[in-house]
């Protein structure tokens, strides 16, 4: 009855089913790992944003690489903005996905070291991309700023190419090592996304808090893959039973239509 399972068609179908089951199980495990990673990242960000601000030099120093645990922590710094060496970061978007610039202003601390401050987003309203945009001035004199500590940007992490030959005072990536060379100064590792004081006239537009990654979606995908893996053998059995019934009907029909043997005289 089950000899058809040895046919070429059924052997291929069975092998495909046997390959799909472990593949789907592994995909479910991978999605569960993604769920755990995103959940941990969301908890880390939430804890960092909820923590009280600390002086910036408690978390970073010249040449320091900002770690995952230090990222998004709120820090404070006291000093003055150096607008003479201010630059803009090209091809950055705001919350409405409008393309413009991020304003990166060196902030000279009381001890002479420099902290890079991303003051926020401005629109690209210049006549051309080679023209330096008009930037609202920061507060003058000594001021205390608060912001979220961020790691240096790299092409590997961001996918943004660090283009050469850009117009004067325009950059592609915020990188403390590169800025230390440009400024010929001791620059603290990483930079901060400014949250206070708020700019006059709401410009530059301060960067919003990082959003939560959709970890629940990965959890749903994991369950989905495991359900698929369980459905493969069930589907295979259903197909086998259907094939068996059809072949049995064909055999019964052949018996009924077969000519009867002549009666013996």
Image: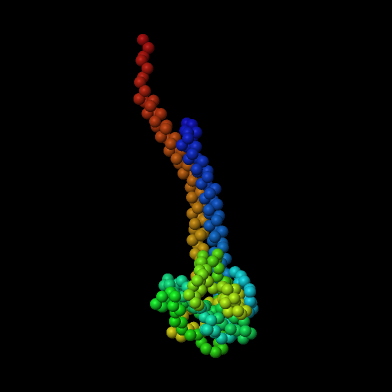
The outermost residue toward the top is: 265
Q: Quadrant of the C terminus?
A: top left
x then y, percent, for residue 195: 52, 80
x then y, percent, for residue 93: 45, 72
Placement of 191 over or under 7, stated as above or below = below
Query: Quadrant of residue 243 in the image?
Result: top left
x then y, percent, for residue 58: 64, 78
The outermost residue toward the front is: 165
Q: Measuring 54% from the left and 61% from the top, which residue is drawn there?
A: 35
Query: Quadrant of residue 68 in the image?
Result: bottom right
Of 47 and 237, the residue lying toward us: 47
Of 184 and 149, the residue lying toward us: 184
Placement of 257 over or under 187, stated as above or below = above
Q: Is residue 174 visible?
A: yes
Q: Is residue 208 visible?
A: no
Placement of 31 over or under 40, stated as above or below = above
Q: State the count of labels.
A: 0
Apparent side of residue 258 relative to residue 41 in the rendered image (left or right): left
Q: Measuring 52% from the left and 56% from the top, which residue is drawn there?
A: 222
Placement of 35 over or under 137, stated as above or below = above
Q: Measuring 52% from the left and 50% from the top, which residue is drawn there?
A: 24
Q: Measuring 46% from the left and 84% from the top, which residue is drawn there?
A: 136
Scheme of image coloration:
rainbow
Of 101 and 85, the residue lying toward us: 85
Apparent side of residue 5 relative to residue 69 in the rendered image (left or right): left
x then y, percent, for residue 188: 61, 77
């Amino acid at each position: 009855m089950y000899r058809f399972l040895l046919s070429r068609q059924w052997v291929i179908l069975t092998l495909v089913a046997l390959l799909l089951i472990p593949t789907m199980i592994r995909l479910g495990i991978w999605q569960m790992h993604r769920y755990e990673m995103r959940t941990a990242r969301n908890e880390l960000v939430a804890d960092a944003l909820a923590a009280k601000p600390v002086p910036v030099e408690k978390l970073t120093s010249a040449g320091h690489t900002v770690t995952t645990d230090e990222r998004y922590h709120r820090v404070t710094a006291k000093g003055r903005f150096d607008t003479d060496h201010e630059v803009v970061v090209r091809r950055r978007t705001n919350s409405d996905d409008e393309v413009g610039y991020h304003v990166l202003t060196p902030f000279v601390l009381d001890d002479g070291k420099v902290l890079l401050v991303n003051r926020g987003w401005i629109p690209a309203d210049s006549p051309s991309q080679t023209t330096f945009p008009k930037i609202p001035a920061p507060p003058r004199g000594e001021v205390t700023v608060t912001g979220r500590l961020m790691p240096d940007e790299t092409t590997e992490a961001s996918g943004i190419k660090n283009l050469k030959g850009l117009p004067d005072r325009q950059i592609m990536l915020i990188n403390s090592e590169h800025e230390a060379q440009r400024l010929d100064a001791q620059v603290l590792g990483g930079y901060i996304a400014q949250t206070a004081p708020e700019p006059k006239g709401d410009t530059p537009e301060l960067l919003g808090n990082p959003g939560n990654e959709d970890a629940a979606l990965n959890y749903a995908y994991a369950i989905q893959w495991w359900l698929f893996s369980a459905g493969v053998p069930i589907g295979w059995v259903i197909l086998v039973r259907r094939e068996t019934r059809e072949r049995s009907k064909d055999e019964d029909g052949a018996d009924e239509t077969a000519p009867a043997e002549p009666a013996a005289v």
